[in-house]
């Protein structure tokens, strides 16, 4: 499995303003973008806080490497040398081709652990809740019946949702943003494409999504490789696309 390092560095924060999918998140609202943080911290200026944010996002996006303390120190040295236009401390051209191999090996190991955890959780959850199978993989548990339209797998929908890991850690929520998210059902993870299309508008359900119908072995920023995910979803509306204008 060859993975793009560039994609890891450029990947946006997980699901920020978007349903579960690989596309870049929607831009933040202008008012929010202009607001400066006044939180108490060790930094003197907002530019220092922005610089910290750059480093934090880079660190989060390379988290799949599972670097040890000594490796993090080495990575920090490499970042410092490059930022200050210093000559590299190692033969970068020699080691660069093997970085993806290192990443694949570590992600594979992490995915195995996460899949085992997800399998144990799913077995218990399915036994306790008796959900329906989602075509293609995953499970669907209706918590409130809807009375509206049933979306097709290529329809655009508005959904309120909350996503958690099997450990109960929330990684994204449209509820916290105060508005449902609109997206095309064929542009999200398979568990959502197939699971949301089992709902009627106005209904609510839980979707339990194994990694093979979610983000797979790569995972993504904020979601571990091989992670099983649990979503609470509310189908707010099936958005009808405009019909093409008829020729006169």
Image (cartoon, rainbow, N blue to C red):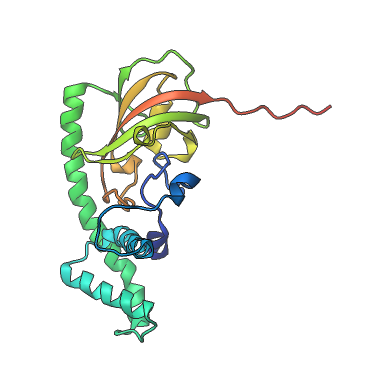
Residue 26 visible? The answer is no
Quadrant location of the N terminus?
A: bottom left
Residue 2 screen position, x and y as percent:
37, 62
Q: Identify which residue is drawn at 36% across, 62% down.
A: 54
Q: Identify which residue is drawn at 30% across, 50% down.
A: 222
From this view, report whether residue 161 is shown above or below residue 215.
above
Left or right, 73 with respect to 217, comes to left
Hey, which quadrant is residue 144 in on the image?
top left
Left or right, 21 with respect to 227, comes to right
Question: In front: 146, or 134?
Answer: 146
Left or right, 11 with respect to 115, comes to right
Residue 66 visible? The answer is yes
Residue 91 screen position, x and y as percent:
33, 84
Q: Identify which residue is drawn at 23% across, 61% down.
A: 106
Q: How many numbered dots are placed on residues in this image?
A: 0
From this view, report whether residue 224 is shown above or below residue 133.
below
User: Please, which residue is most extreme toward the right here?
Assistant: 248
Hey, which quadrant is residue 132 in on the image?
top left
Residue 117 screen position, x and y as percent:
17, 43
Hey, which quadrant is residue 143 in on the image?
top left
Left or right, 109 with respect to 57, comes to left
Q: Identify which residue is drawn at 21% across, 45% down.
A: 115
Residue 25 screen position, x and y as percent:
45, 47
From this view, report whether residue 86 is shown above or below residue 19.
below
Question: In front: 40, or 206?
Answer: 40
């Amino acid at each position: 499995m060859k993975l793009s390092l560039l994609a890891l560095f450029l990947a946006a924060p997980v699901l920020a303003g978007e349903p579960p999918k690989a596309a870049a998140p929607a831009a933040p609202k202008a008012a929010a973008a202009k607001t400066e943080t006044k939180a108490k911290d060790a930094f003197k200026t907002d530019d220092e806080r922005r610089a910290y944010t750059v480093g934090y996002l880079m660190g989060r996006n390379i988290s799949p490497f599972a670097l040890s303390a000594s490796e993090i120190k080495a990575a920090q040295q490499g970042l410092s040398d490059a930022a200050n236009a210093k000559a590299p401390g190692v033969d970068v051209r020699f080691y660069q081709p093997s970085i993806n191999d290192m990443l694949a090996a570590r992600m594979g190991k992490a995915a195995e652990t996460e899949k085992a955890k997800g399998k144990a959780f799913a077995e218990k959850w399915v036994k306790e809740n008796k959900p329906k199978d989602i075509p293609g993989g995953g499970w669907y548990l209706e918590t409130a019946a809807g009375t509206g339209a049933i979306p097709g797998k290529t329809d655009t929908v508005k959904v309120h949702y909350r996503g958690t890991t099997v450990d109960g850690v929330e990684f994204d929520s449209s509820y916290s943003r105060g508005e449902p998210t609109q997206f095309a059902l064929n542009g999200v993870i398979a568990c959502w494409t197939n699971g949301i299309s089992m709902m009627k508008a106005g209904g609510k359900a839980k979707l339990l999504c194994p990694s093979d119908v979610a983000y797979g072995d790569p995972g993504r920023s904020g979601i571990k490789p091989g992670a099983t995910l649990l979503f609470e979803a509310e189908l707010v509306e099936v958005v009808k696309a405009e019909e093409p204008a008829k020729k006169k």
